[in-house]
Amino acid sequence: MFPKPIEKTSPITQRMYKIALPVALIIWLLPLIAVALTSIRSAGDLNSGNYWGWPTSFNLIENYTAVFTNSPIAKYILNSFKVTIPTVIGAITLSAMTGYALAVYRFKSNLIIFFMFVAGNFVPFQILMVPVRDLTLQLGVYNTTTGLVLFHVAFQTGFCTLFMRNFIKALPFELIEAARAEGVNEFQIFWYVVLPLMKPALAALAVLVFTFIWNDYFWATVLTQGANSQPVTAGLYTLNGQWVSAWHLVSAGSIVAAMPPVIMFFLMQKHFISGLTFGAIK
Amino acid sequence: MSLLRFEEKMTAVTRFWKENQLGLAPWLFLAPGIFMFLLYVIIPITQSMSISLYEWDGLGQKEFIGFANYVELMDDEAFYTSLKNNVIWLVLYMLAIPGGLFVALFLNQTVRGIRIYKSLFFFPFVMSQVVVGLVFSWFYDPNFGLMNVIITSFGFEPIAVLADERLVTYGIIIAGLWPQTAYCMILFLTGLNAISTEQIEAARLDNAKGWRMLWYVILPQLRPATFIAIVVTVIGALRSFDLVSIMTDGGPWGSSRVLAFYMYEKAFSEYGFRMGYGAAISVVLFGIMMIYITWVLYRMYRDERGA
């Protein structure tokens, strides 16, 4: 192990390390802690300039209730789910198939198609913005969650294909050959042989895509407006403009908006990290 | 009679399928994915290139103006500000890589509760950049932000980071480095985990330790992790739209614009949509990105050949 395991160092170093850990963590999360503390303060405290002193009252429940009753944040969150969940399902379905095709079959344009997906995945969003907005308008899905889902599914298919293809490539190919020798057709091989082995990849991509899409802000502002279709990222920006000096509400709102991916991360940490670090080791 | 013929036809289809399924199957699997990707990604790229040759408000008639948008860009001071800021972003964002490595080395221990620490250090990456932007906006606030509370408690004057033309871009980049460092950290932690203990022990016997050990033994083994860290950090730097939009809206006086943001601003300007001009900016950004994409693809191609 590198660096040297702390148990093998002197007792003083060990003690220092144990003190350094929480101190470093508090410094690292300081901006976030500040927001969390603000979110339980009363408006009175903020008005009287008591930003960082001991709060005169703890308004945890009041503030968070106020966020839900004074703003359409519940609607925004619902919209976020309406965008995120279908996107996860759509992108994973499409890319399981493309990834399978690119990993298992040898044909001339294989590598070109694969590189198209990879390259497209790196493209700056702005070069897609004007035509995609136009297309969304033409399809009649501008300002709807469907419009966002369609774009996100298409774009995420790029990243997911890269992931799936490399994952399937690492599976033992003999399994597929054996199935073919038995006369199993290609669709059955995909469904009964390969797909069950892809469960870790499917789980990893599901959490990753969920987080990416939940946190998307750019496309939310380009393809939607107003509380009827906007997801929570764009909604939060709007609320920030409305609640100019109500910092306790803005911070409570931010924490609410950040919750779903955070919960997702803690529940599926192993898959999340294995997805994110895929390729980081040989 | 017709039923018989139908059956005959079916067997012909089945036979055709049986004989050609290895050739046909990949295309059937690829079709939906390729269709969506062409429709929403590949074709729009070419459309943007073509739109950049027009003057267009997004609704009315397009007017072909050749390279006039690009010529205009050459004299656009705001474009150069954005370009310069993009370079600053790109350079400073790279700090996330050594930063992430440093945090990873710090956390790569097996003391009790270390897993929770790792997760909490990773926290900033899981949050939306909108939240990160809001969090840092308050942190920097000259009147009540925690940063200035700390600064003034040491007897210094408060600094209005986001209202200062010279500091604003750096202030936003620091906000961006927060989640990005967390991302690099997790890549390096995974990499460190995979390093063989035997090699480290062998190097220890050869009296390698500290920096020498890191440089000659550890870093070479972290190459795949470093490669991915570079890839995601460059993309992160060039995609810097969210934070600029949330924290400053390009201000003060446009001094924190980056190309991604400036393009959006021009295309959806309150003084009338200029889709053509916006598209021209995005083509420039795309060109910069393309250099880098080519490098990544080249490396992948080399690995594919090698495999």
Image (spheres, rainbow, N blue to C red):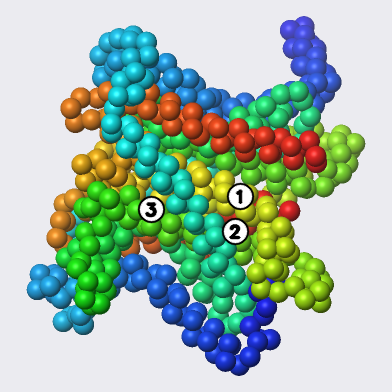
Q: Which chain letter goes with mark 1? A: B
The mark nearer the N terminus, 2 or 1, is: 2
Q: Which residue in the protein does label 1 denote?
A: B228
Q: Which residue in the protein does label 3 denote?
A: B173
Give how far across and how far down residue A169 sits, in percent: 75, 43
Give how far across and how far down residue B196 sits, in percent: 77, 67
User: Crowding at label 1, few (<14), some or many (≥20) Cα neighbours within 10 Å?
Assistant: many
Whole-angstrom CA distance, mark 2 to mark 3, is: 21 Å
Q: Which chain letter goes with mark 2? A: B
Q: Which chain letter goes with mark 3? A: B
Q: Are marks 2 and 3 in contact (CB under 8 Å)?
A: no
Q: Are marks 2 and 1 in contact (CB under 8 Å)?
A: yes
Whole-angstrom CA distance, mark 3 to mark 1, is: 20 Å
Question: Which quarter shows the C terminus of chain B?
Answer: top right
Residue type, label 1: Ile
Q: Is residue A76 visible to the viewer in this orientation of the structure?
A: no
Q: Which residue in the protein does label 2 denote?
A: B187
Whole-angstrom CA distance, mark 2 to mark 1, is: 8 Å
The residue at 57%/52% (across/down) is B229
The mark nearer the N terminus, 2 or 3, is: 3
Q: Is residue B94 visible to the viewer in this orientation of the structure?
A: yes
The residue at 39%/62% (across/down) is A259
The part of the image, by quadrant, that contains residue B305 is: top right
| Front-lying residue, B91 or A81 | B91
The residue at 73%/53% (across/down) is A282
